[in-house]
Image: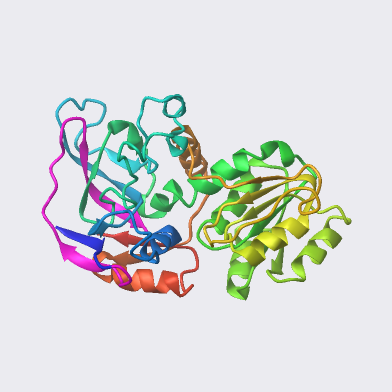
Amino acid sequence: MKAIQYQTIGELPVVADIPLPEPGAGQVRLRVTAAGLCHSDWFVMSLPAEAYTYGLPLTLGHEGAGIVDKVGEGVTEVAVGDDVAVYGPWGCGHCSECSQGRENYCPFAADLGIYPPGLGAPGAMAEYMIVNDVRHLIPLKGLDPVQTVSLTDAGLTPYHSIKSTLAKLPAGSTAVVIGTGGLGHVAIQILRAITGATVIALDVSEEKLTHAREVGAHTTLLSNSDAPAAIRELTGGIGADAVFDFVGATPTLDIARRSVRIDGAIESVGIGGGTLATGFGSTPFGVSVRAPYWGSRSELMEVLDLARSGHLHVTVEEFPIDRAPEAYAKLHDGQVLGRAVVVP
């Protein structure tokens, strides 16, 4: 079967021909119907050899959807032909966090050698993939997998972040979204759907700011050193109740610090490599600074329910599997408006 693999440190992924995998006991094999590309993939592929720990070759793709093709011994909860999405942050399944469906915060997964698909385990960027446990499959219930697959990360991650700050976002509040690309344009829609906040969106691209307005942003600003003053002016000098940084670089985190109100919240979601000093004299009094990671299984179900009800729509650019390396290059160069999806 065809798979998109990262095979050599520092080089682009390639289309490879690998054996069809067989499911073991408790496992499920999916015929992949859609696989999403993510900047997290580039983060992994940009690591130097001494920092790379994910194994080679690595079949990419931590956003996956597919049709159950074969089940391993003991699997009864799904049947061949079921249309499902894959919950990506796999945990041990037994600790207190996993027992709550919060496998994204499992403290034992790495020590046990349990890794997400595409981020250590073979991923969804292939014609078939193995899912290690049936609990990591969420029924699509009629959703289009191509339009839906990105929600397993690009929807789940902002949803988890926003849901964690709901108390800060009643009617009359203000939320700032920095970076309106793959995750950010979905975050805008989630904020409009589940909060009472006015949404201010920031980006360096006029095209992406236009798109941000199309998906629900009330106001858009260029992401630069003038943005914090503009945000304070828009909020009567108070600042934003919550700032969601989907870039995570030092300049954007500084914008967040200068834009947030007293007792507000900064959610550093992006993996741009920046850090933010917090404490007396750095961030305003009472401000919480948090780096959320992915989301829970129940939150993914809620995200898919929002999509089913028409509140979420991912802007998708489709690629056949043979053009996946080209899609990764476009993603790296910022030429994908929303989310790139490979359809095997």
Q: Is residue 57 left or right of residue 46?
A: left
Of residues 277 and 301, which is closer to you in this image?
A: 277
User: Could you tell me which residue is drawn at 50 percent across and 41 percent down?
Assistant: 303
- Judge from the rendering whether residue 119 lies leftward or rightward of residue 1; answer left or right: right
Locate residue 258: give its quadrant. bottom right
Question: How many discs mark residues in the rendered view?
Answer: 0
Residue at the spot 44% in from the left edge and 62% down from the top edge: 39
Front residue of this view, candidates 270 and 309: 270
Q: Residue at x 21, y 35 (%)?
A: 27
Quadrant placement of the C terminus? bottom left
Residue 78 forms part of the magenta stretch: no
Residue 180 relative to residue 88: left or right: right
Q: Position of residue 270 (x, y in %)?
A: 55, 57
Question: Percent position (x, y) of residue 180?
Answer: 58, 62
Image quarter hosting the N terminus = bottom left
Q: Nearer the viewer, residue 271 or 246?
A: 271
Q: Is residue 213 visible?
A: no
Does residue 109 lie above or below 1 as drawn?
above
Residue 12 is one of the magenta-drawn residues: yes
Q: In this picture, is 297 found above or below 3?
A: above
Q: What span is colored magenta in the figure?
A: 9-36
Q: How is the image coloured?
A: rainbow
Query: Residue 244, image x and y in percent?
Result: 64, 53
* Residue 24 left/right relative to 209: left
Q: Quadrant of residue 16?
A: bottom left
Residue 46 vs residue 243, the one in the foreground: 46
At a point 79% along the width and 61% down the height, the residue shown is 231
From the top left corner, tell me how far across and down residue 266 is, in percent: 68, 49
